[in-house]
Structure formats: structure tokens, C-alpha cells
Image (spheres, helix red, strand yellow):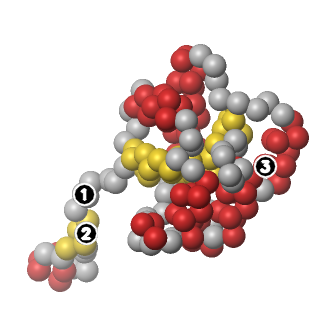
Amino acid sequence: MMKKSPRLAALGVTVKHASIIRPARILVIEDNGSDVFLLDRALKKQDLRFELVHLLSGSEALAFIRMQGAYADAENPDLILVDLNLSRYTGEDILREIRRATRLSGVPVCVWSSSQSRRDEAVLKDLGISQFITKPSGLDQFMEIGKTLKDLLARSKAA
């Protein structure tokens, strides 16, 4: 918010008032609620101001990406995290659609999966993902994901 005081305006000075920084908006496309719960905990451990937007299915994700139905006025996320193994639509399908959506260009996209396949990782890198994250089996390793995403958001904002 820019405001000019009459005295300062005469000098050509504009004063910026501090505004509240909005939380990072993280879109999570994941059909496992437990993983989303753990992700939320991992991000809170990082003292990160964030808002999770959780979509349970590939169908919901496609509607969000295409701004259809309930998502017609959806705001762009600052980061997208996609589960590779969704029902009906795969994470790869979702990634291809994200890359077609010009409004989402520049938004970092991460894929997470329990798969440790090098083929998956190589194909996804070709689709322009920012990070491939292997879903951990333990709570401590899960907490590391919070740091990874916080760092990715910081790099994205700095760019």
C-alpha cells in the first residue's frame, strides 16, 4: 500500500507502509490424508507461514489447473506438490496439464512418491519438475521434507 503525505509528496518521496506478508500457498495433490497430515507437521516445524490447499484426486487437480467449477476463481499456488501414484489420473498426467497451463508457468512443481524408480525420476525431470522427493517411511525423514519445501519456496521467491 503506497501513501503519500503532503509534505513528503512535495519532495517526491513515497512512503511504503509495512503490510502483512501473505502465507505461502502450497497446493498438495495427494490421495493419502495421513501423508498430508505429516506434511503439515513438517512444514510447521520449519516456522513457515503457509496455507495448504489439499486436493484428493487427479480429477480435482485437473479442475483446479483448468479453473473449472469450484476452482474458477482459484488463486495460483506458490508451490505445487503432486503424488505420483494417484487413482484414475497419474501424477505424470497432472504434470503434463500443469505445464500446459500458462498461468502456472514459473510455479515450482515437486513430485513425491514411494517409488524409487530412476525411470520415473528421469521422465519427470523431462517434464520440468523442480524436485523429486521419495516419500519417507519414518517421521524424522518426513520432517526433512518441510525443510526441502521451505528452501524451494525461498529460491523461487528470490528468482
The residue most toward the front is: 88
In front: 46, or 1? 46
Find numbered disc 1 in the image and state the secondary structure of the residue it sits on.
Answer: loop
In front: 93, or 145? 93
Instruction: Give the mark nearer the N terminus: 3 vs 2.
Output: 2
Name the side, left or right, on which 69 lies relative to 115: left
Quadrant of the frame with the C terminus: bottom right
Look at mark 2 in the image and give the residue it sits on. 1
Comparing labels 3 and 2, the label whose residue is closer to the camera: 3
Q: 62 above or below 81?
A: below
Position of residue 38 measured from the top left corner of the image (x, y, whole percent): 48, 28
Q: Residue at x 72, y 57 (%)?
A: 93
The residue most toward the left is: 6
Look at mark 3 in the image and give the residue it sits on. 124
- CA gap, disc 3 to disc 1? 40 Å
In front: 32, or 140? 32
Q: Residue at x 19, y 80 (%)?
A: 9
Q: Residue at x 27, y 54 (%)?
A: 20
Identify the disc placed on residue 18. 1
Quadrant of the frame with the N terminus: bottom left
- CA gap, disc 2 to disc 1? 8 Å
Name the side, left or right, on which 109 lies relative to 4: right
- Cβ atoms under marks 3 and 1 closer than 8 Å: no
Mark 3: amino acid = Leu
Position of residue 59 measured from the top left corner of the image (x, y, whole percent): 59, 58
